[in-house]
Image (tube, rainbow, N blue to C red):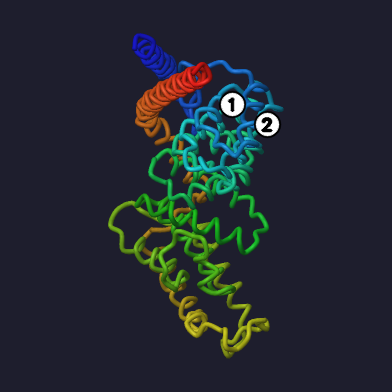
Amino acid sequence: MVSSKMAASLIKRCLYVKCKSLTPFLSVRRWLLSAAYTDPKVWEARMTEPHNLAALANMMDRTYDRNFPVSSLTISRFVDNISSREEVDQAEYYLYKFRHSPNCWYLRDWTVHSWIRQCLKYGAKDKALHTLKNKVQYGIFPNDFTFNLLLDSFIKDKDFKSACFVVEEIMLQEAFDLHSTQILSLYALSNYLSAKPQLTILEERSLGASLLLCGLKQHSTVGLSAQLLGNALLGKVEFLKGIHDVFKGMPLFWARGYLGRSLDVMEVAAADVGHVKLSKDALDFVNAVLQELSSHTDSSGEPLEKDDKKEEEVDEDDLAEKAKLPNYVSRFEELMSQLESRGKVEPTSFKATVTAMCEQQLADAEKPDLEEYLSQVQSWEAERRQLIQREQETRQKAEQEKQERLAARAAAQQA
């Protein structure tokens, strides 16, 4: 009990000192997570249990060979005691084994958090991303704070493609609740798109869904511009591949007409009485999508490219949606004129607008995250101590039962 209070006190002091010492830094121009946010001292202040990884690995192998389940504490101890890049690879193997064992549902949240931290600490971000993208095989479902740490690390390396993979996982897990996560996600997406990468249909779908769902979290120039881009990308996929390819595996509302909804965003911006605008390059992107899709049809409105699907498999509703393209083009031109006449076109690029939002809002968004993280670490530690106590009680009970059996056997032999 005394040690737990000391640990909690140490955690609070670490967080307080870091936040206090970095207060002047937070006031200057910056748009990435601060040192206070990413500092591992709060995490490392926990009461950890030193263990030999070779001994733990041997114990887990023997347990699996006997078809017995490995406890969540055991895999947690293995991850917590990683001390090199090579041991990260070993831990990946045992995370996979644990996920495919009878105890797979009991991988603890703090073990997932520890795994991501260890990957970042020992230069194994590729492993973190691999296990995240293959989350079903490894059981890696991070919380919001953990997502932010991984996302921020890729952004600081200017690896925006990998950062967008993280954003995609955040989108699939519908974890855009934290304002800080929204800011970092939009920053990664805007920087990646600004480089004009060559995207596959699947990548356009993922980026579109990420932009849309993240943009829906805020009514602002950035939020509406993200919605505009997201709907346009999804509308392109819908036009080329059909609505079923849009929704497959995505947490999206089942309704046709994404190109139409991108124009609805323009209408909302045009009617807004506040300071909300739409970025000029986002509007140019929508126009380019409409022109590209128009080039896929002839004057009769039929697709130029032959569809490999059988005639009976063609979705009539998809064809009806494609037939609306000329109306979408004319409506875009009308709405564009309204936006320009009402001063609702933001000349600053989407990327620059998002960057400005990061500089203005990210520091304030960190504060509630850090407070919640402190509470979360303490909660995890309380749960871990309960599990350790239960493990000790179970071992004591098993040992007592073993001694009783031996005594009974010895008495039977004497009789």
Amino acid type assigned to the residue bearing label 1 in the image: Phe
User: Which residue is labeled 2 in the image?
Assistant: 90
Does any portion of residue 12 appear in the rendered image? yes
Amino acid type assigned to the residue bearing label 2 in the image: Gln
Numbered-mark total: 2
Q: Is residue 117 above or below residue 263?
A: above
Q: Is residue 334 above or below residue 111?
A: below
Q: Is residue 358 above or below residue 27?
A: below
**As drawn, is 16 to the left or to the right of 81?**
left
Camera-nearest residue between 326 and 151 = 151
Question: Image quadrant of residue 77?
Answer: top right
**As drawn, is 332 to the left or to the right of 309?**
left
Camera-nearest residue between 72 and 288 = 72
User: Which residue is labeled 1 in the image?
Assistant: 78
Q: Residue at x 57, y 84 (%)?
A: 313
Residue 411 rendering spot, x and y as whole percentages: 48, 17
**As drawn, is 5 to the left or to the right of 189?**
left
Camera-nearest residue between 121 and 281 = 121
CA gap, disc 2 and disc 1: 9 Å
Q: Is residue 46 above or below residue 308?
A: above
Q: Are marks 2 and 1 in contact (CB under 8 Å)?
A: yes
Residue 27 rendering spot, x and y as whole percentages: 42, 24
**As drawn, is 85 to the left or to the right of 261?**
right
